[in-house]
Image (cartoon, coloured by chain):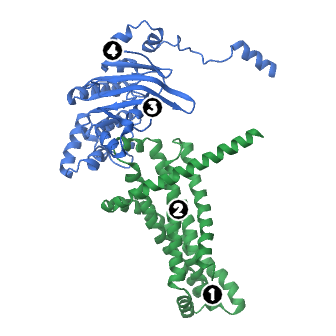
Chain colours: A blue, B green
C-alpha cells in the first residue's frame, strides 16, 4: 500500500489548469521523483500533499488519511511526520543554524534543552555542518543552507521528506553532497522521499521511480532505466535535454515573415 | 464604458475579499493571543523591537511638538493676558489629541512599516510556509506576539510622547518665555481631568495601536511575495494607518468630547 495516494487530482489557478486527472502512488521506503519542465506544477503538487493548497477535485491520502478532510489540528499532527525541504531552504533568518534545527524540537518535543542540544548536534553531524552551528543563515552558501534545512526537516524523525528542487543552482560539489545525503538518509532512516526536480541525471541517479509531468498530466512513469528506454519522443527530449522536439524551441506565435512584414507595414 | 464598469466591479470585489481576509486574519490572531501568556518571552522579544526601538523617535518628536505648542500657545494666550494657562493648553492638546495621534502616526511609520516588511520578507523567503510545514502555525507563533506587543507598546509610547511634550512646553514657556512655573504646573493639574482627558487619551492610543498593528501585520501577511510586492505593502501600511488614525480620531473625539 502506498504511503501517498493521489487520485484524479484537479487543480486550477484561475482559468489555467495545473493538474487535470493526475494519479500518483508513492511507496514507503522509496525515493520517488516528480519531474517535468519548469511551470508544470511540481512545487504546487508538494504544497497539495502538505495541505497548504486545496485541490479543486480528487483526493490526496497520506498514510491512509485524506489530507484535505483533516481538521486544522489533525493536519498539523500529520505535518509533524512530514518533513519538507524548500528550494530556498526557508531557514529562519533571525536564528542561528543551531536554533533553526532546534526550532521544531523546541516547539513540539517538550524535551529538556540538554537533550535538544545533543539531538541538534547529531542532526548537524549527519549533514556535515556541526562545525557551523553558531553561524547565521546569511553566512551560509546555498548548498550549506539546504543541508541545514535538511537537518531541520529530519529533526522530528519524520516518516517522509519532500524535497523541492534540491539541486537547483548548486555547484557540482554541493550537488554531489546533496545527492549523496538524500540517498543515504533515505536508506539509513527508512524514510520515504519525494524529490521534485528537473535535474535529470542527479535525480535519475537516486530515484527508484519517476513520474514525468507535463500539460497538467502524468505523461509517463517508471524506473529511471524504463524512462531512458521509453519510445516517447517527449520523454526522450526531456531525459536527454534536447533543445527541440515535441516541446518546440520557439514559443508559439506568428511566423517570422509575418512579424517582419507587420513591423515594416507599421513603420 | 463597459470596461470601466467591469474594472470598477473587479476593484469592488477585490476590496471586499481583502476586507474579509483581513477580518479572518484578525480573528485567527486574536484566537492565538491567550496562548501567549504561557510563552510570554515571545511577546517580550517583540516588545523590544516594536516598542523599545521606537522610544527615541517618540521622545525627540514629543519634545519638539511640546516646544512648538509652548511657543504658539504663548503667542496666542499673551494677547489675552492668559499666558499662565499655557500648561493647560499644552497638556490638554497633548493628552487628548496630539499624544495619541502623532505617536500613532510615528508608530505606523517606524514600527508598522518594519512589521510589514519583516512579515512580507518572511513570506517571500518561504519562512512562513516552512513553519506551516513544521506544524507550527505562523499566525500564533509569529503574528500573535507582534500583535500583542503593538497593542501594549502604543499606549505606553503615546504616554511618553505626551509626558515629554508637556515638559518641552514647560521648557519653552518657563525657560524661554518666562511663564511662572508654579502657575504652569498647578493650572495644568487643576484643569486636566484624570478620567475625562487622560483616560480618553489612553483609550484612543489603545485603539490606534490595535488598528495600526492589525493593518501592518495583515499587509505583510497578505503581501505579494516579491520585492515590489513587499515595498507596496509597506507603503500601504503607512498610508492606510494614517487614514485609519485620523478617521478614528474624529469618531472617538466626537464620542468622548462631542457633548462637552
Residue A194 versus residue B226 in the image, above or below: above
**Residue sitting at x 67%, y 44%:** B9
Give B100 or A57, whichever is nearer the viewer: A57
User: Marks 4 and 1: same chain?
Assistant: no
Classify residue A23 as left or right of residue B163.
Answer: left
Find residue A152 and report its horizontal and vertical position in percent. 30, 40
Spatial distance from mark 3 to mark 4, Cα to Cα? 23 Å
Q: Residues within 10 Å of mark 4 (few under 14, many from 20)?
A: some
Quadrant of the frame with the C terminus of chain B: bottom right
Q: CA distance from mark 2 to mark 1?
A: 39 Å
Q: Is residue B143 left or right of residue B236?
A: left
Q: Which residue is mark 4?
A: A223
Q: Secondary structure at mark 1?
A: loop
Residue B143 can be seen in this image: yes
Kindly state the secondary structure of the residue where label 3 is placed. helix
- Real-space CA distance between mark 3 and mark 1, rounded to the nearest whole angstrom: 69 Å
Position in image of residue B208 (x %, y %)? 53, 66
Label 4 vs label 1: CA separation? 89 Å
Of label 3 and label 4, which has the lower sequence position? 3
Q: What residue sits right under mark 1 in the picture?
A: B177
At 38% from the left and 49% from the top, the residue drawn is A94
Q: Where is mark 2, residue-wise?
A: B211
Structural crowding at the residue carrying mark 2, measured as other residues with C-alpha within 10 Å and reported as few (<14), some (14–19) or many (≥20): many
Q: Chain of mark 1?
A: B
Q: Which mark is residue B208?
A: none
Residue on which the image places disc 3: A44
Q: Chain of mark 4?
A: A
Residue at horizontal 45 percent and vertical 33 percent from the top: A55
| B73 w.r.t. A222: above or below | below
The quadrant of the image that shows the N terminus of chain B is top right
Amino acid at each position: 500500500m502506498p504511503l501517498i495516494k493521489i487520485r484524479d487530482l484537479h487543480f486550477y489557478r484561475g482559468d489555467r489548469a495545473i493538474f487535470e486527472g493526475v494519479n500518483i502512488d508513492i511507496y514507503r521506503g522509496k525515493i520517488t521523483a516528480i519531474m517535468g519542465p519548469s511551470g508544470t506544477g511540481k512545487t504546487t503538487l508538494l504544497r497539495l500533499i502538505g495541505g497548504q493548497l486545496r485541490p479543486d477535485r480528487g483526493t490526496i491520502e497520506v498514510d491512509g488519511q485524506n489530507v484535505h478532510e483533516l481538521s486544522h489540528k489533525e493536519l498539523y499532527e500529520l505535518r509533524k511526520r512530514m518533513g519538507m525541504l524548500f528550494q530556498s531552504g526557508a531557514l529562519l533568518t533571525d536564528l542561528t543554524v543551531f536554533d533553526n534545527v532546534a526550532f521544531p524540537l523546541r516547539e513540539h518535543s517538550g524535551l529538556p534543552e540538554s537533550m535538544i542540544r545533543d539531538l541538534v548536534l547529531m542532526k548537524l553531524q549527519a549533514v556535515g555542518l556541526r562545525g557551523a552551528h553558531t553561524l547565521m543563515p546569511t553566512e551560509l552558501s546555498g548548498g550549506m543552507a539546504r543541508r541545514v534545512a535538511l537537518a531541520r526537516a529530519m529533526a522530528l524523525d519524520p516518516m517522509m521528506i519532500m524535497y523541492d528542487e534540491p539541486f537547483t543552482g548548486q555547484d557540482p560539489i554541493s550537488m554531489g553532497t546533496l545527492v549523496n545525503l538524500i540517498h543515504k538518509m533515505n536508506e539509513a532512516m527508512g524514510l520515504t522521499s519525494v524529490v521534485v526536480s528537473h535535474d535529470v541525471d542527479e535525480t535519475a541517479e537516486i530515484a527508484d521511480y519517476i513520474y514525468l509531468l507535463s500539460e497538467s498530466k502524468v505523461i509517463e512513469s517508471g524506473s529511471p532505466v524504463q524512462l531512458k528506454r521509453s519510445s516517447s519522443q517527449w520523454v526522450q527530449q526531456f531525459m536527454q535535454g534536447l533543445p527541440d522536439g515535441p516541446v518546440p524551441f520557439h514559443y508559439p506565435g506568428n511566423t517570422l515573415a509575418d512579424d517582419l512584414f507587420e513591423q515594416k507595414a507599421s513603420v | 464604458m463597459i470596461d470601466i464598469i467591469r474594472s470598477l466591479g473587479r476593484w469592488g470585489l477585490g476590496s471586499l475579499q481583502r476586507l474579509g481576509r483581513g477580518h479572518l486574519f484578525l480573528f485567527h490572531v486574536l484566537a492565538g493571543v491567550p496562548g501567549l501568556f504561557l510563552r510570554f518571552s515571545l511577546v517580550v522579544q517583540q516588545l523590544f523591537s516594536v516598542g523599545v526601538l521606537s522610544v527615541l523617535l517618540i521622545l525627540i518628536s514629543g519634545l519638539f511638538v511640546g516646544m512648538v505648542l509652548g511657543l504658539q500657545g504663548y503667542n496666542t494666550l499673551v494677547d489675552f493676558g492668559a499666558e499662565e494657562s499655557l500648561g493647560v493648553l499644552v497638556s490638554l492638546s497633548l493628552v487628548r489629541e496630539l499624544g495619541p495621534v502623532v505617536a500613532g502616526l510615528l508608530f505606523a511609520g517606524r514600527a508598522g512599516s518594519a512589521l510589514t516588511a519583516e512579515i512580507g520578507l518572511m513570506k517571500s523567503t518561504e519562512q512562513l510556509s516552512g513553519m506551516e510545514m513544521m506544524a507550527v502555525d505562523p499566525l500564533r507563533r509569529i503574528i500573535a506576539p507582534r500583535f500583542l506587543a503593538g497593542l501594549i507598546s502604543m499606549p505606553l509610547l503615546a504616554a511618553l510622547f505626551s509626558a515629554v511634550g508637556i515638559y518641552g512646553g514647560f521648557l519653552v514657556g518657563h525657560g524661554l518665555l518666562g511663564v511662572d512655573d508654579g502657575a504652569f504646573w498647578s493650572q495644568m493639574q487643576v484643569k486636566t481631568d484624570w478620567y475625562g482627558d487622560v483616560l480618553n487619551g489612553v483609550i484612543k492610543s489603545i485603539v490606534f495601536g490595535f488598528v495600526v498593528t492589525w493593518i501592518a501585520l495583515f499587509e505583510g501577511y497578505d503581501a505579494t511575495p516579491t520585492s515590489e510586492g513587499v515595498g507596496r505593502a509597506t507603503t500601504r501600511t503607512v498610508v492606510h494607518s494614517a487614514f485609519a488614525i485620523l478617521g478614528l480620531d474624529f469618531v472617538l473625539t466626537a464620542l468622548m468630547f462631542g457633548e462637552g
